[in-house]
Amino acid sequence: MKAIVNVYLKQGVLDPQGKAAHHALGSLGFKGINDVRIGKQIVLDVDSSVTSEMIKEMCETLLANTVIEDYDFELKP
């Protein structure tokens, strides 16, 4: 089973990497992009005993800095 965790900066938190990517995309001629936010994806290979509550605890204690980051996750068979 896989747990897919997406971590991204909260709205209102400055994202200099996203701003740089936004500027670069515009410089390359890509139009219609209003904003870019850069995050990270963590893929955990887990066994069937791992629950959603356990994944949430992992995110809250290690995988995400909940002061400045939000996260979501999905368990896939």
Image: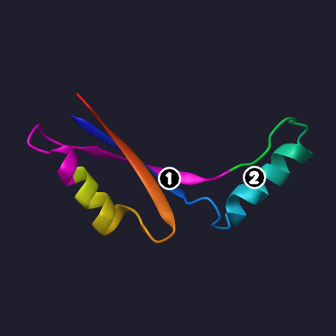
Task: Pinpoint residue 28: horizontal percent, then vertical percent.
Answer: 88, 41
The reply to whether residue 34 is in sight is yes
Q: Quadrant of residue 75?
A: top left
Q: Is residue 62 part of the magenta span, yes or no? A: no
| Kind of residue at disc 2 | Ala
Which image quadrant is residue 31 in? Answer: top right
Q: Secondary structure at mark 2?
A: helix
Q: How many marks?
A: 2
Residue at 16% across / 44% down in the picture?
51
Give percent across and percent down for residue 62: 32, 67
- Mark 1: few/some/many CA within 10 Å (<14, 14-19, 20+): few
Looking at the rendering, the stretch of residues picked out in magenta corresponds to 37-54
Residue at image position (50%, 52%) is: 40
> 61 or 47, which lies in front?
61
Q: Is residue 2 above or below residue 53?
A: above
Q: Quadrant of the C terminus?
A: top left
Q: Residue furthest top?
A: 77
- As shown in the figure, which amino acid type bears the numbered disc 1? Lys
> Which residue is labeled 1 in the image?
40
53 relative to 33, above or below = below
Sequence-first tag of 2 and 1:
2
Q: Which mark is residue 73?
A: none
In the orientation shown, which residue stands out farthest toward the left?
49
Mark 2 touching mark 1, by CB under 8 A?
no
Rounded to the nearest whole Å, what is the CA distance between mark 2 and mark 1? 15 Å
- Crowd band around label 2 with a 10 angstrom C-alpha radius: few (<14), some (14–19), many (20+): some
- Answer yes or no: is residue 5 visible: no
Horizontal relation, residue 15 to residue 32: left or right: left
Could you tell me which residue is drawn at 75 percent across and 52 percent down?
21
In the picture provided, is 31 more to the left or to the right than 76? Answer: right
Read off the residue under disc 2. 21
**Residue 53 on the magenta span:** yes
